[in-house]
């Protein structure tokens, strides 16, 4: 892997997440999902959980400031770590909300937040079927979406397609698993 690509991708994540966090807060925590969105975070609960973590970090930070009032260096370090964590939590919450799988009329985009993306034409999909998954075996192959569910959608393509990853380790796949809140409905939508 090219070191320049790795540095670029990490920089994009480091600068991209604070921008996402700002958009999430500015949008009133109601960021609109794109048309054709298919969620993989159990009905949208993950952004709420991440937002709650960000809010609950504030009282924790105040308590640590009180406990570390005589150690200025440690207090500042604690505040920096808390602020960084809050920004990351809000940025990830925005990513969950705005980066789902997307079923378009001609194309389908499979995602795992901003970490992994595969966009293929609909006619490239040969088969989409709901399968029982063993979490240990599901980690071995390519998987899109978040969560360990007992059912996922196995998608088979006509020819290998390139998966883009945020760390630059692109690879080709022709069969992969997709997590979705409603796997049966998602498989039917892919088949049509």
Image (cartoon, rainbow, N blue to C red):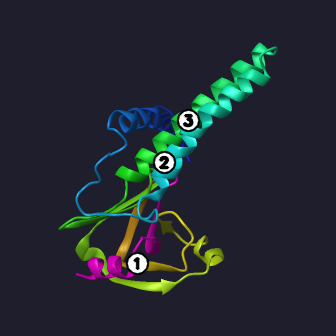
Q: Position of residue 134 (x, y in %)?
A: 61, 80
Give the class, few, some or many, for how many residues have Cα within 10 Å of label 1's Cα (few <14, many ≥20). many
Left or right placement of residue 21 versus residue 69 in this view: left
* Residue receiving disc 2: 166
Q: Nearer the viewer, mark 1 or mark 2?
A: 1
Hey, which quadrant is residue 68 in on the image? top right
Identify the element where label 1 is drawn: helix
Identify the element where label 2 is drawn: loop
Going from the N terminus, do you reach mark 1 or mark 2 first?
2
Q: Nearer the viewer, mark 3 or mark 2?
A: 3
Residues 164 and 90: in front is 90
Q: Marks 1/2: CA distance? A: 25 Å
Q: What residue is shown at x 34% (from left), y 33% (from top)?
A: 26
Q: Is residue 61 magenta?
A: no
* Number of the label disc, if any, that sits on residue 56: none
* Magenta region: 167-192
Going from the N terminus, do you reach mark 1 or mark 3 first?
3
Hey, which quadrant is residue 60 in on the image? top right
* Residue receiving disc 3: 86
Going from the N terminus, do you reach mark 3 or mark 2 first?
3
Q: Are marks 3 and 2 in contact (CB under 8 Å)?
A: no
Identify the element where label 3 is drawn: helix
* Number of the label disc, if any, that sits on residue 183: 1
Give the class, few, some or many, for how many residues have Cα within 10 Å of label 3's Cα (few <14, many ≥20). many
Q: What residue is shown at x 53% (from left), y 42% (from top)?
A: 89
Q: Marks 3/2: CA distance? A: 21 Å
Q: Marks 1/3: CA distance? A: 32 Å
* Residue 3 in view in this figure: no
Q: Position of residue 183 (x, y in %)?
A: 40, 78
Q: What residue is shown at x 48% (from left), y 48% (from top)?
A: 166
């Amino acid at each position: 892997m090219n070191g320049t690509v790795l540095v670029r991708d990490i920089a994009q994540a480091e600068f991209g997440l604070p921008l996402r966090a700002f958009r999430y807060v500015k949008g009133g925590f109601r960021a609109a999902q794109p048309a054709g969105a298919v969620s993989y975070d159990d009905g949208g609960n993950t952004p709420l959980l991440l937002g709650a973590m960000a809010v609950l970090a504030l009282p924790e930070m105040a308590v640590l400031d009180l406990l570390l009032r005589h150690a200025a260096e440690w207090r500042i370090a604690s505040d920096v770590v808390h602020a960084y964590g809050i920004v990351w939590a809000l940025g990830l919450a925005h990513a969950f909300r705005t980066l789902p799988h997307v079923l378009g009329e001609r194309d389908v985009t499979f995602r795992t937040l901003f970490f992994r993306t595969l966009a293929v034409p609909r006619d490239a999909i040969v088969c989409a079927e709901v399968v029982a998954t063993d979490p240990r075996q599901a980690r071995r192959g390519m998987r899109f979406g978040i969560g360990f569910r007992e059912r996922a959608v196995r998608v088979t393509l006509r020819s290998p397609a390139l998966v883009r990853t945020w760390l630059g380790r692109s690879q080709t796949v022709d069969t992969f698993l997709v997590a979705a809140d409603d796997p049966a409905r998602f498989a039917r939508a892919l088949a049509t």
